[in-house]
Amino acid sequence: MQITYTEHADARMDFRKISKKEVEEAISQPYFTASSRLGRTIVVKKKGDKYLKIICDRSNDKITVVTVYWTRRP
């Protein structure tokens, strides 16, 4: 499956010190996934006492990461 990143996602990942490897691991082995109200997919990966949240668009065999951030709540 091909994973691409929007400019916004790249900028947020740089600012928040989140690597593409962490994002790809979360997408391949999520803690859980959910649908958002805009038809996007929310991928959550637990790391210690925090959760890595990834908002992405899925279509056929392509995933486009829209934004990525850390949170304390899933």
Image (tube, helix red, strand yellow):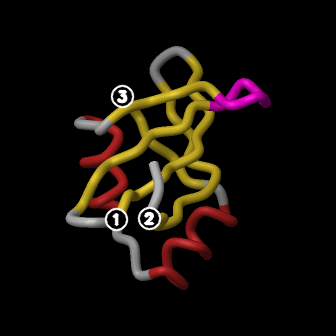
Q: Quadrant of the N terminus?
A: top left
Which comes before the other along the chain, label 1 or label 3? Answer: 3
Q: Which residue is mark 2?
A: 72
State if disc 1 and disc 2 touch (CB < 8 Å).
Answer: yes
On screen, residue 70 versus residue 11, left or right, reads left
SS for callout 3:
loop
Which comes before the other along the chain, label 2 or label 1? Answer: 1
Question: Relative to residue 2, is residue 47 depicted above or below?
Answer: below
| Residue lying at 48% horizontally and 64% vertically, measured from the top left | 71
Query: x, y percentage for residue 56?
Result: 58, 40
User: Of helix, strand and loop, which mostly describes the magenta segment?
Assistant: loop
Residue type at the position of mark 2: Arg
Q: State how far apart marks 3 and 2 are (Cα).
A: 29 Å
Q: Which mark is residue 50?
A: 1
Q: Which residue is mark 3?
A: 1
Magenta span has 17? no
Q: Residues within 10 Å of mark 2 (few under 14, many from 20)?
A: few
